[in-house]
Image: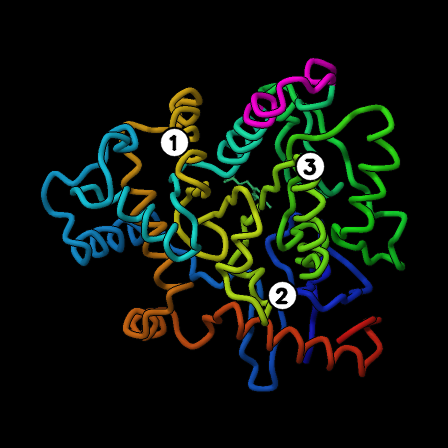
Amino acid sequence: MLSIRGTPVDFGLSLVVVALAASPHSSTLATFASSSSATYNLQRMHKEKSPQETFEELANVCERLGLKNHNWDVYGDFDKDSSQTSFLRKFESEVAQELGTQDAVFMPSGGMAQSIALLIHATTIETSSGSRTNSSSSCGHHCFACHHTSHLLLHEQAAYYHLLGMNAIIVDTLHQAEGISIPPLTFAIVQQVLDDEYKKWSIQPSTLLLELPHREIGGKTTPWNDILQIRKYCTDNNIKLHLDGARLFEATTGYPDQSLQELVQIFDSVYISFYKGLGGMTGAMLLGSEDFCGQARIWLRRFGGNLYTLLPYAVSGWAGYQRQWKLNSVQEKEEKEVNGPLLLSFVQKKEKLVRLVQLLCRRRYIKSSRV
Ligand SMILES: Cc1ncc(COP(=O)(O)O)c(C=O)c1O
């Protein structure tokens, strides 16, 4: 028996799911039952836990990490580094090392992290190119470009405008849609919009924001060659390239020939989330050069985001990162004992999806352009 609900699911597979029932914000992407009648939920890989269970688990993680003394971080531990007794700074440098960036800053939310990235890039570009004529216009350096389904456009109450005083150049791929399958950002469309529609008015964004995977269109990813071309275009045109990597770890399944570090090093800055695929309570990290992260810490203070302590969120994020990404075999085994065998890794999920879609295609429920 098969049932499918929710938005199109596509980890680089270009699928078109006909008969969509739920809104794009539905928490369920696709649920199906196998012949053994086990139900797989392809989005929610995490067992739902009560606050009490969550806090008990956090206490266990603290014990495992040896956080028994006065290990609280205070106001982001800006004055400490990873060699000192700051769990927060160690966590930041552990993730920076994994992703191959010089530094990382833990923050309460992705909204805050990406606002900070946009602000830093706008000021850096303005200072470095000083004489850009349009910097005080309604766009120019005070604007950024993004796909028309970007989280910043759809779900953040236009914070970029109200908080940052910036405007958005919308790179719309709707007109290229085949049926209901909306394409992700590609080099051709970026170049077309920025060159043909904006350059002639001397309007240029300070940042191009690329979301990988594109959440609202079922997790599609921009092809690798397009990313390389977009990088070159940004360098040539003095535009910073930022990655909205809320689901970066899932995105890696779209680039089987590239390492996580190869993907990350294309960008001037990267944001990742700890409460989505990684399953932490909440929290985000902004990653980039030492200089960029130094500025990010200043902006974090200005935004009031370096809470008196971030420890509960950092510990929870660290545990999710270990469990879901580092796949430490002992922890994975423990997790399976608690949650049962239905917990799927990102890669297992992708395999299940491919099988599901192939099955549905045979039954003509789905039109597929490339499976
Ligand atoms: C693609 C994307 N970017 C950014 C965010 C913002 O993250 P936060 O809720 O931590 O502000 C989200 C949250 O759902 C998201 O899906």
Question: Is the residue at mark 2 in contact range of ligand 1, meaning its CB lies under 8 Å from it?
Answer: no
Q: Residue at x 61, y 86 (%)?
A: 35
> Closer to us: mark 1 or mark 2?
1
**Disc 1 marks which residue?**
294
Give percent across and percent down for residue 268: 54, 42
Q: Helix or strand or loop: what does disc 3 sit on?
A: helix
Give percent across and percent down for residue 118: 57, 30
Report the image quarter containing ligand 1: top right
Neighbourhood count class around disc 3 (C-alpha, 10 Å): few under 14, some 14–19, many 20 upward: few
Q: Helix or strand or loop: what does disc 1 sit on?
A: helix
| 140, 252: nearer the viewer | 140
* Residue sitting farthest toward the bottom: 35
- Identify whether 359 is placed above or below 252: below
Q: Is residue 135 magenta?
A: yes
- Image mark for residue 254: 2
Q: Residue at x 60, y 77 (%)?
A: 351
- Alpha-carbon distance for marks 2 and 3? 24 Å
Q: Which residues are magenta?
A: 123-138
| 53, 29: nearer the viewer | 29
Give percent across and percent down for residue 255: 61, 66
Question: Quick one: label 1 or label 3, which is nearer the N terminus?
Answer: 3
For the C terminus, which image quadrant?
A: bottom right
What amino acid is labelled 2 in the image?
Answer: Gly
Q: Is residue 30 magenta?
A: no
**Disc 3 marks which residue?**
154
Instruction: Check whether the beta carbons of the residues at disc 2 and disc 3 lie within 8 A of each other.
Output: no
Question: Quick one: label 1 or label 2, which is nearer the N terminus?
Answer: 2
Tell me: 132 left or right of 242.
right
What amino acid is labelled 1 in the image?
Answer: Gly
